[in-house]
Amino acid sequence: MSKQAIILAGGLGTRLRSVVNDVPKCMAPVNGIPFIHFIVSWLKNEGIESFIFSLGYKHAVITSYLEKTFPDLEKKYSIETEPLGTGGAIQKACSMVTGEQVLVINGDTLFNINIGSLVKTHIEKRAACSIALKEMKQFSRYGAVELDANGRITAFHEKQYCEKGLINGGIYVIEVVPF
């Protein structure tokens, strides 16, 4: 099983600026604790041993917090000097991955799934990329994901009202190809 994760936390957090304008989105306090604390703690509990933090906007705030709060955590930092987008951030961070697969998770979302089961299915299916999907009802805020009978993604639909459907949960397992 993959024991390494990339946490994507480099965005500008423009939608959250009106509420939290002085820190990156993943540092928004939840009951006085930065959100990223919950992600790291959950991933450690799920068996992740090594972390790569993909950072950009106000990255020093995040690295300072992580160094102080998790001094013994095995961690590396992939710092964007200019915004690379999600794909570019993942590609840059993958240069630090040591295994064949890596878990990738958005630093502003917590979607409680069994990571071991996701990785196991990914390996069994010999997938290049696996995405954790979440069933939702009566939503318009998210794009919907369409699957075929074998569980393969056939389409991503733009945001529109759906009575019921699957959304991208922001957790991926990807095969790492050396570049």
Image (cartoon, helix red, strand yellow):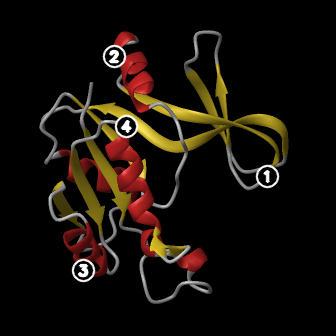
Reading the image, the residue beneath label 1 is 140
* Mark found first going from the N terminus, 4 or 2: 4
- Give neighbour class at mark 2: few <14, some 14-19, many 20+ (Cα, 10 Å): some
- Give neighbour class at mark 1: few <14, some 14-19, many 20+ (Cα, 10 Å): some
In what element is the residue under mark 1?
loop
Instruction: Please state the horizontal and vertical placement of residue 148, each as a whole percent of the image.
Output: 64, 15
Q: Quadrant of the N terminus?
A: top left
* Mark found first going from the N terminus, 3 or 2: 3
Q: Nearer the viewer, mark 4 or mark 1?
A: 4
Q: Residue at x 30, y 72 (%)?
A: 56
Q: Residue at x 55, y 45 (%)?
A: 111
Reading the image, the residue beneath label 3 is 60
* Mark found first going from the N terminus, 4 or 3: 4
Q: Residue at x 50, y 76 (%)?
A: 29
Q: CA distance from mark 3 to mark 2?
A: 35 Å
Q: CA distance from mark 1 to mark 2?
A: 32 Å
Which kind of residue does numbered mark 1 sit on?
Ser
Reading the image, the residue beneath label 4 is 46
Q: Nearer the viewer, mark 4 or mark 3?
A: 4
30 on left or right of 38: right
Q: Which mark is residue 123?
A: 2
Instruction: Please state the horizontal and vertical placement of residue 74, each as a whole percent of the image.
Output: 15, 52
Q: CA distance from mark 4 to mark 3?
A: 27 Å
Q: Which mark is residue 167?
A: none
The image quarter containing residue 162 is top right
Q: Quadrant of the C terminus?
A: top left
Discs 3, 2 touching: Cβ within 8 Å:
no
Q: Nearer the viewer, residue 10 or 29?
A: 29
Discs 4, 2 touching: Cβ within 8 Å:
no
Which kind of residue does numbered mark 4 sit on?
Glu
